[in-house]
Amino acid sequence: MARAVSARRRRARALVRDAGADALLVTNPKDVRYLTGFHGEDSWAVLSPRSITVISDFRFQEELASVSGVKVAIRSGPIEEAAAEVLPPAGPVAIQAEHMSVARRRRLGRLVGATRLRETTGLIAGLRAVKDEHEIALIRRAVRAQERALVETLDTLKPGVRERDLAAQLEHRMKALGAEGPSFDTIVAAGANASKPHHRLGGARVRASRPVLIDWGAVVGGYCGDMTRVFCLGRWPARLREVYEVVLDAHEAGVAAVGPGKKCAAVDAAARAVIERAGLGPMFGHGLGHGVGLDIHEAPRLARASADTLEAGMVVTIEPGVYLPGVGGVRIEDDVVVTARGARRLSRLPKAIDWASR
Ligand code: ZN
Ligand code: ZN
């Protein structure tokens, strides 16, 4: 693990050099975790050519003493002042434009000299898109935990159960199975609510012959899983049964299109074509998928307008959906890792409509 983290720092230093800077001030907490293994609130890191220093406070002092390969600066004053002391005394400093407020940038500029600051975007995000084996193993464990939790929760999927009670069960079981928590607010959408891709939980009840869409994820070791399944208790409404088969075909076409060197827009198009051929194109109003990792949504983006290209080691979701207002919706989402030859699914739960009929 320590070797993997130092390899990440080596790659990050090369990017910082390419950006024309000597050091990088890391202000995104997920990037601090990625480059050091440490995660705590209100903590930054300075990546210099030969070392990395975590800037934190008393709350994390003891924890930081056991993090190998990093220097530690415990601050008692403002974080910008502590950063100014750790940063090299001269030369350009890269900052993370997406992860620093205008006010903080101004204060830092006053302390170290505003002309030394170089704005960068997506530097570490680009590295994080390609996972090492430790990261893939953690995502797989998150997926296992959420899959087992769902299977256990299916016992309670009965007519009359409320959306929020199903979500609470699922989240409780994920934690009982070793997850740190849900990777995002669990979506349980009963009946016509399933036509809203990001329905907010409520007291609606599951009913016979109506769909229930569950989009859920677990976090293990900081890494997120993300899956969606749709169930129906008893007979499927005829229209939704057709839609289910189309979405499942689109999902399989999307997974089949995944491979190293493939354009993300082309993978989106492969799945979207199946839905368009069925005349349902306008009902698939979002992108096909996204990277998952320390963040639930990260690079790359699988969408029509994406300029990203897949590389071996990326972990992405494939989640086509069709939404019929007033009726319900179907989305089927799995997590896949891009391999040298194509794609390997990390999720194992079935998807056939027989399994989705309860
Ligand atoms: Zn999802
Ligand atoms: Zn997703």
Image (cartoon, rainbow, N blue to C red):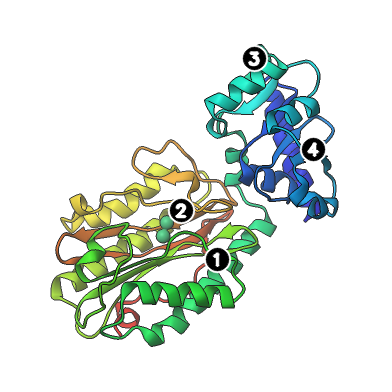
User: Residue 222 at x, y = what percent?
Assistant: 62, 58
Badge 1 amino acid: Gly
Please give the residue where the numbered disc 1 appears in the rendered image.
Answer: 181
Residue type of the residue flagged with mark 3: Ala
Residue type for callout 4 = Thr
Q: Are marks 1 and 2 in contact (CB under 8 Å)?
A: no
- Specify whether 96 is left or right of 188: right
Vertical side of 255 occupied by 179: above or below: below
Q: Left or right: 45 with respect to 347?
A: right
The numbered mark, 3 or 4, whose residue comes first in the sequence reads: 4
Is any part of residue 269 visible from this angle?
yes
The residues tagged by marks 3 and 1 sit, at their Cα atoms, a distance apart of: 40 Å
Residue, disc 2: 258
Local SS, label 4: strand
Check disc 3 and report the residue beneath it. 114
* Mark toward the viewer: 2 or 4: 4
Q: Is residue 349 visible?
A: no
- The type of residue carrying mark 2 is Val
Q: Earlier in the sequence, mark 3 or mark 1?
A: 3
Neighbour tally class for label 4: few under 14, some 14-19, many 20 plus, Cα within 10 Å: many
What's the distance in space between the residues labelled 3 and 4, CA to CA?
A: 22 Å
Label annotation for residue 53: 4
Residue 29, image x and y in percent? 63, 44
Mark 1 and mark 2: Cα distance apart in space: 29 Å
Quick one: label 3, few (<14), some, or many (20+) residues within 10 Å?
Answer: some
Using the image as rendered, state which of residue 155 and residue 172 is in the foreground. Answer: 172
Frontmost residue, 124 versus 198: 198
Q: Nearer the viewer, mark 3 or mark 2?
A: 3
Q: Helix, strand or loop at disc 3?
A: helix
Q: How much space separates mark 2 and mark 4, taking CA atoms?
A: 38 Å
Point out the tag, 1 or 2, that comes first from the N-terminus.
Answer: 1
Q: Are marks 3 and 2 in contact (CB under 8 Å)?
A: no
